């Protein structure tokens, strides 16, 4: 049945459970032909028009093998490793970073530590080929993010040492993020905020 | 740009804001051809295979003008007026009702009271033609739901009076719903729970 | 240490955890003599001035053995059995009830079903002595509340049958409470709302 | 009425609204004499036994003018300025700091910027008298906390400059706090995390 098929497909959407998947299917059943047609057209184009950058692996609308950021000569020769496209978008939106990126594709799972779907090999190759001035590991400040950051460091260690001049690998600063109150801070945040005081 | 178009279309999905619409678009960009193809096929079929029942206006998978519930001779000759398809599904799931339904398509908006998209006229015609034993108004216990229920009663009033034997129009019982604690109940719920005690 | 003692005592307050108990202690340490004195005076008076009604067991400010509600001859000869004082207050606030009350003191615990602290015996005695026209069991619509209600019915069964004319025992009506949407209702609420339609 | 007086006094407790204040009053009415007596005794002692340290202004159980931290010669000669006692407690609990403290008493209000109740003058005097190696401003990473931090810096500026060797004034490090995900970070946190990378 097409209805159940739709529900099954929507269940794979990020953050969508059974109830909302059914609401989506009912919503679509109630839309006019024009809306459905536009959605089908956009979906048909997404695989042809949205390309994955061969340098940073983010998805972008456009021609060529490289996205606008990777192709931009005015960007600094720094590579920030992020978990996913939306992280990159949020950092770009902040306007405080003018380097380049590498989208890893997620974090190591705590359950099995599986690398499946993560681009450690591509990262190794890109860094070997490009030798940037600095690599900023920008995974989340969570247990998974920290594990993944350590694994990235291990993966990149041979390159770092093989260089004539060792490559600089950094991680985003830890401390109080906006809104943090001391009364409710965990020990690690207090410790980092203290170490990184200035 | 196809990406922005996708985000724009997903923004119309029920309960989806800009951030989640972007996540959906990135999710789709990262899916393989097979998934996208399946989604396109399901969408193409939704308008051909999912029909709207000409009797109760719910969407259903199947052939013919009437859905399985409306076509079922063993169902009682009662019509429950619900706001939307998911309400009907939830009531069916409970297994406590064995009558028929009518899907109104929503509630009167508090802003403008617009009937747009609501099937008052279809309801009037159905009831005029079918003369069921009872009509149960099953709108939500909210201000909008109550307004809509009163409006339904007004719409059906001429039929109710025109009958030789007046048609029975009821509303779902009010009182304590599962989980309600007296300490936190509003006056209306206390009042209804008291009136409907037994 | 007095500080730790204060924290220990505040931990017994309803809904107060360790963090808030400490905040209370620090708050008090920072108050002036006048505030502390007022608080001590109010506490000293609470046991002398706040009495427990010997008829309904609620706490009240005032003289005599009976609270204002129990002493009021214009109140109907109905007894509503509630879990706790704040339930009674909330029902009084609603202004829809003009009978009397009985404060049970809580609900049967699901863990051990212990009656400790609950006034089943006092209820039995009051009903035996007073023979009201009706007893309304107004426990919460929760599993504990329902268990307790059934237990109250069992306790009162001998009185109900012993009467020349059987005493009327009712429970608050079940159905949709204010704000309930059909889409999210559980089976029991749907079932009750349907049974109690009118 | 003593009951209403209790409610009025509990309403001043931090984070307590009318409903919980009533629950507290009913709770107390239901306690035995022993509990009430213990609470009264603890309250009577709080003003005599809990002292405010004349050096850091925190409340402590004990004798003398100085709290255990201020009197401890093994503590480093650093002063961390915190908003309130519970912040100090949370930092002590983390075990990562071995200096001393100064409890300011709150933050500047955004409404009126009133200094009322805040110990800027005491801070100025303490720093003038003690000349510590470093002052760490540890207000929250909120708008109020930041305003207050800037005001502290202004207050201490004359001392900082008057010294032969300028006194070191730092603020807690900003960046990702535990649990922060890049996707949901605000611009300021991203900017700080980037600046403080290492």
Image (spheres, coloured by chain):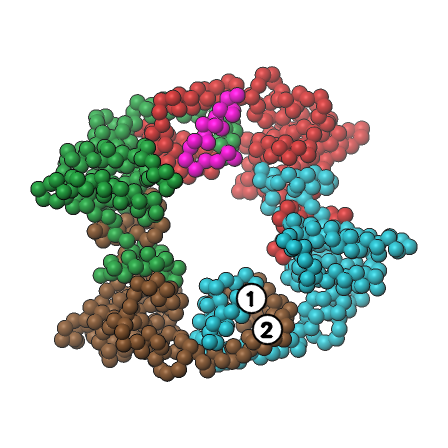
Chain colours: A red, B green, C brown, D cyan
Q: Residue furthest right?
A: D164
Q: Residue furthest left?
A: B164
A122, C108: nearer the viewer: C108
Position in image of residue A3 (x %, y %)? 33, 30
In the figure, is residue B131 to the left or right of A43? left
The quadrant in which residue D193 appears is: top right
The quadrant in which residue A122 appears is: top right
Q: In the rendered image, which residue does mark 1 sit on?
A: D12
Please report, as a chain letter, where disc 2 is located: C
In the figure, is residue A175 to the left or right of B135? right
Q: Is residue B151 visible?
A: yes
Position in image of residue A182 (x %, y %)? 65, 55
**Residue at (72%, 41%) from the top-left corner?**
D196
C14, D162: nearer the viewer: D162
Please report, as a chain letter, where disc 1 is located: D
Q: Are marks 2 and 1 on the same chain?
A: no
Q: Is residue D104 above or below residue D25?
A: above
Q: Residues within 10 Å of mark 1 (few under 14, many from 20)?
A: some
Q: In the rendered image, which residue does mark 2 sit on?
A: C35
**Residue at (32%, 24%) from the top-left corner?**
B47
- In the image, the segment drawn in magenta is B1-19
D89, D159: nearer the viewer: D159
A171, B127: nearer the viewer: B127
Position in image of residue A169 (x %, y %)? 72, 35
Q: Is residue D124 above or below residue A198?
A: below
- Tell me, yes or no, whether the two marked residues, 2 and 1, touch with CB atoms within 8 Å: yes
Q: Is residue B85 visible?
A: no
Tag 1 secondary structure: loop
């Amino acid at each position: 049945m097409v209805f159940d098929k739709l529900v099954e497909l929507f269940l794979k959407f990020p953050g969508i459970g059974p109830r909302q998947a059914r609401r989506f299917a009912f919503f679509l059943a109630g839309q006019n032909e024009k809306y459905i047609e536009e959605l089908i057209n956009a979906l048909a184009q997404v695989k042809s028009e949205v390309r994955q950058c061969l340098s940073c692996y983010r998805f972008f609308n456009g021609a060529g093998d490289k996205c606008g950021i990777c192709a931009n000569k005015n960007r600094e020769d720094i590579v920030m490793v992020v978990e996913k496209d939306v992280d990159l978008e949020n950092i770009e939106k902040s306007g405080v970073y003018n380097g380049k990126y590498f989208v890893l594709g997620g974090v190591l799972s705590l359950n099995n530590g599986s690398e499946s779907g993560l681009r450690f090999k591509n990262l190794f190759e890109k860094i070997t080929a490009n030798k940037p001035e600095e690599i900023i590991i920008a995974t989340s400040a969570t247990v998974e993010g920290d594990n993944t950051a350590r694994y990235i460091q291990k993966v990149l260690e041979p390159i770092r040492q093989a260089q004539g001049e060792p490559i600089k690998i950094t991680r985003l600063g830890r401390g109080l993020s906006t809104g943090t109150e001391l009364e409710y801070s965990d020990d690690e945040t207090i410790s980092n905020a203290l170490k990184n005081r200035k």
